Image (cartoon, coloured by chain):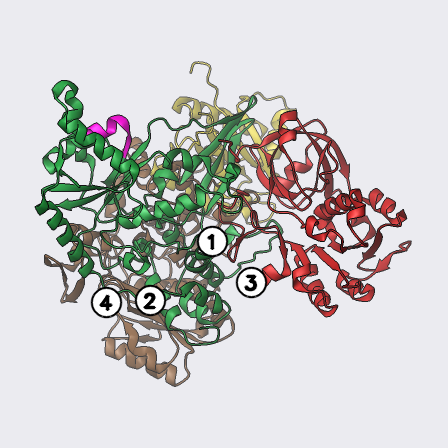
Amino acid sequence: MVRLEKGKFDDFIRSLAEDYIVYAAVTTGGKSSFKVVASAGEIDEGRLLTDRSPKEIFFPHSEVLFEYDEDGIRETEKAGKPIAVWGLRGCDVKSLAMLDKVFGTARQMPDNEMFEDPYWKRKYDNSLIFGLACNEPRSSCFCNWLGGGPHSEDASDIFVIDAGDVFLMQPVSDKGKAFIGKMTDAAGASAQDEKRAAGASVAKASGADEKKAAELASGARAMMAEPPDLDGLDERLKGIFHEDIWEEMSAKCVNCGACAFVCSTCHCFDVQDEGKGGKGKRIRIWDSCMFPIFTREASGHNPRPLSRDRFKQRVMHKYSYFVDNYGESLCTGCGRCVIVCPVGVDIREVIKRVLSFEGKGAR
Amino acid sequence: MKDWQPKILAILCNWCSYAGADLAGVSRIQYPPNIRVVRIPCSGRVDPLFIMKSLQSGFDGVLVSGCHPGDCHYLSGNYVARRRFAILKPLLEFIGIEPERVQFSWISAGEGERFAEVMTKVTNDVKKIGPAKRLVKGVQK
Amino acid sequence: MIEELREKVKKLLAGGDVELVIGWEKGSQPLSSTPVFIDSPEEADRLVFDSTCGNNPAVYSTKDARRLVKAGKKVGVVVKGCDARSLSLYVAEKQVKRDNIVIIGVPCRGVLDSDKVEELAGGREVLEYSEQDGKITVRGKDLDLTFDAKDVLSASCLACIYPDAKEYDIFIGEARDGKPNKEQNAAIDEFEKLSSEERWKRMEEIYSKCIRCYACRNVCPSCYCNECFVDQNDPQWIGKTPEITDTMIFHIIRNLHVAGRCVECGACERACPMGLDLLLLNRKAAREVEERFGYVTGIDSGEKPAMADFREDEKQNFIMG
Amino acid sequence: MSNTYIPVNMRVETIAVEDKEKALRTFDLVFVDEADGKRFTYMPGQFCEFSLLGKGESPFGIASSPTETDFLRFTVNRTGSVTNEIHYLREGDTVGIRGPLGNWYPVEKFKGGNVVIIGGGFAFTTLRSLIVYMLEHRQDYGDLTVIYGARNPDLFLYKDELAQWQKRDDLTLHLTIDKPVEGWTGMTGFVPAVVRELAPSTENAWVVVCGPPIMIKFTLPVLAELRFPDARVYTSLERRMKCGIGKCGRCNIGSKYICIDGPVFSMEELGEIPETP
């Protein structure tokens, strides 16, 4: 573990920005999202969670797949510098790792790179993720329901703890270790590489630092309520698929896509062409299973015609289908959907209701 | 920019304004070649979406023309349309679309001369304010 | 007040006067309430009404509950002034039969804009909330603030003219008449002073934040089309991207579709996860409708909605002479 | 790394109009770049995304058989905006193709068995691929029975080929139409009823059913009645699709994605999916 004095945070970000495209939480017009930054001053460190999901760093709302004109198809340019993301909360780090399972791998055809998503991979594979510990989780947080925690290091390259005057950085992955290693080397280096030395003013963390980190971690954990046991939720959901309980649980849902669009793991998209004459582009755009048009076929037939069907699909996909395919729920408990839902649907209540349901099909 | 010529979409009702355009044609009355005509059954058929879509696709101006009040082939189509445009027009100006971009007129089947006048006026109006930039989709980047 | 509401609802349900009552209950978040469907007298104690009740419950009488309404079953709806206007609009537009709904008015003091509260709380999470005599108190860790309700009310409420239902079957307390509100047009008057460039710039600022989640549309009581124009894909009229031209066309057309039908409840603005200032355009359209056609939405369920009507001798100064 | 979102170019070689209303057209395509053709290997039952720049993409089952090496065949029914545009194509035009996508009919499993193929309407495309494939490998399979229904005689696909098949003695072909029409010598009645009437033997048999959802819905109970085990009945599903590679979520049904886990499923597999197709 190393320590970075907050007084040198700006130097750190500036030096990081030399080798990476640096994303961090930025607030504009009262709403925050991950944006490219060049200095620490632009970063909103006070935010626990950004309003917009950080998935857009690697999977933007609208992304050009290729452009075309009379001469044919031109692939969009590949990314230059690798991406570094500063200050992703544990839940968000985990969500990217989940999305990597979808986009970065070929589940059905292993070793068939045709089924990997090049647009995701070219950005995510070389990225450097700085996870940031949550010292004060919100009441809407429920990462601990899903195997996460406010100080979970999972999937971070480097895990950062805000300990008042200093950031304590714990390298987690090999990439992270290499980065921290380079930084400590640079700190030891002389002034011949002035910029690098200045930017990388880190020191080895002291015993007191480690103690502080452990205190913050246990304090944060204590702030979160005891989670329910979600074991077997996936099978339970399948069992009650045809029960009326869905009618009750989805009654107030108005089928907007607010939950899906702020969700850090929802990744459904649409592919469309935009063009005029012989010129244009093929783009992919976020879409949501909440919208009736999502599954409506050209014939007019819609396999999920009712509001309830679509609500059910979203819950089933997150807590059952994804478990079948990738071994975990497609939810990190960030609670964004709880915060934004315009009609107060709280996914935690839905889960609890499913767990407590005793009718037919429940096991 | 010197050579710039505006593209103007004229959405004309079948029974009056389109016939007016026809009359202007057969009477060999000159009007600017910047006009592209779309014929619709009635001005009441004009969904504001048509107008927005036209601007988005790169038309520099849109003119909608129907029968004079009282002359609608379907009796009240243009009255209903008038209410719609009465809200659309101030709303577009409110958000910052130049008033010259979207205009409305009534032209009857017998007004070939007037048709040419209106087209000339709309073309000149749009020429004055220049190419449309707001709401235009940047597909040609 | 709340006891009276619960008692009335219990009676309605117990007496079989209604099958279902739509209202609000306490939400899972400190500053929230959430729509609730009460179908038995025992459940009626879940009902709440306070300044967190920002949803327009009328919306459900055209969505899921419409099945009940269509089946000829009676549904009770607990309403603020604006929500009641939506029901009147539904009756005028023949979406529900007046006889099939029981309008239960509650006295509204305005509803909160949670973004405003959060701003005043300065990033600290609000864990508790209480209100008394026009004062609102929020508490949380290192947080204990009391402010005037009007500092945190929604823009729609600050400009409200009809806080209480005009058409109702039951009113809890005494319904106030509509009263002029000088705030009503303040925002648009201010906006209209700007130049065309400045107005466009401001619009770009607003609509570039849109993420196309359609929360505004789906909580809007006036948006009840079975298929929205943005969901039509054959032909597809409007792009689905978050690009400014697509988002703006979506909002402008939606605005036109609810012109003369918007009750200015502000539910859209409160629903918006990105905090878009959506009411400005709505208010502008409503004022145009009122000035030109003398029509105010949802005040008289017997009146024909403005955009479905016309007069032959109307002002047409916007048409080329 | 190859980019599977980029279509490869194919030229429209021939176009055949299948019906009098010109709603069904068959397109035979060839690869513009031969190298693309070499890379493109497929099996009966797989599909492709048919791409028209500026208009979009639509998935279609491949109607040609891998044994027909000089072209790739698709039959397109005119329903929406993309299919409409496809119908405007002329011979010599260039189109984009992404694929082959999805899984295929388990022809390896079928080896040594009798195969009953039940098709309806214009969903006969991938069934044609399967039949042609099996006829090319005739010695690998036992009895081949094909039951194919259409609303009227005009709506059968590949009429010339059907006529040839009817003459063969190594394939039993039953054609049926919904209502009697003058001059029609084949069978009459809906597919499920015809299947019940013909009652194909279950002995060492595999069944492939493909057709409109309503036909499948009523045929499956008949197959159960005839005691075909679920594990030996296969069908091909359809849903809206976009990416074709299991990412975009559109064709998700239960834990499966039709584009990568399907489109071919056995009834046994489908039984485990709570959301019934």
- Does label 2 or label 1 sit earlier along the sequence? 2
Q: In front of the other: label 4 or label 2?
A: 2
Label 3 residue SS: loop
> How far apart in space, not on screen, are marks 3 and 2 (Cα)?
25 Å
Q: In this rendering, would C162 be left or right of D271? A: left
Q: Colour of chain D?
A: red
> Mark 3 is on which residue type?
Glu
Q: Are marks 4 and 2 on the same chain?
A: no
Subunit under mark 3: D
Residue sticking out furthest to the bottom: C15
Write the start and end of the magenta stretch as one range: A14-22
Subunit under mark 1: A
Residue C321 visible somewhere in the drawing? no
Counting every numbered tag in the picture gives: 4
- Label 3: few (<14), some (14–19) or many (≥20) C-alpha neighbours in 10 Å: few
Q: Nearer the viewer, residue C271 or A294?
A: A294
Label 1 residue SS: helix
**Residue at which label 3 appears:** D272
Q: Colour of chain C?
A: brown
Among the chains pictured, the one given yellow colouring is B
> Mark 1 is on which residue type?
Asn
Q: Residue A21 lies in magenta, yes or no?
A: yes
**Residue at which label 1 appears:** A325
Q: Are marks 1 and 4 in contact (CB under 8 Å)?
A: no
Vertical relation: C165 (above or below) A64:
below
> How far apart in space, not on screen, are marks 3 and 4 (Cα)?
47 Å
Q: In front of the other: label 1 or label 4?
A: 1
Q: Are marks 2 and 1 in contact (CB under 8 Å)?
A: no
Quadrant placement of the C terminus of chain D: bottom right
> How far apart in space, not on screen, are marks 2 and 1 (Cα)?
21 Å
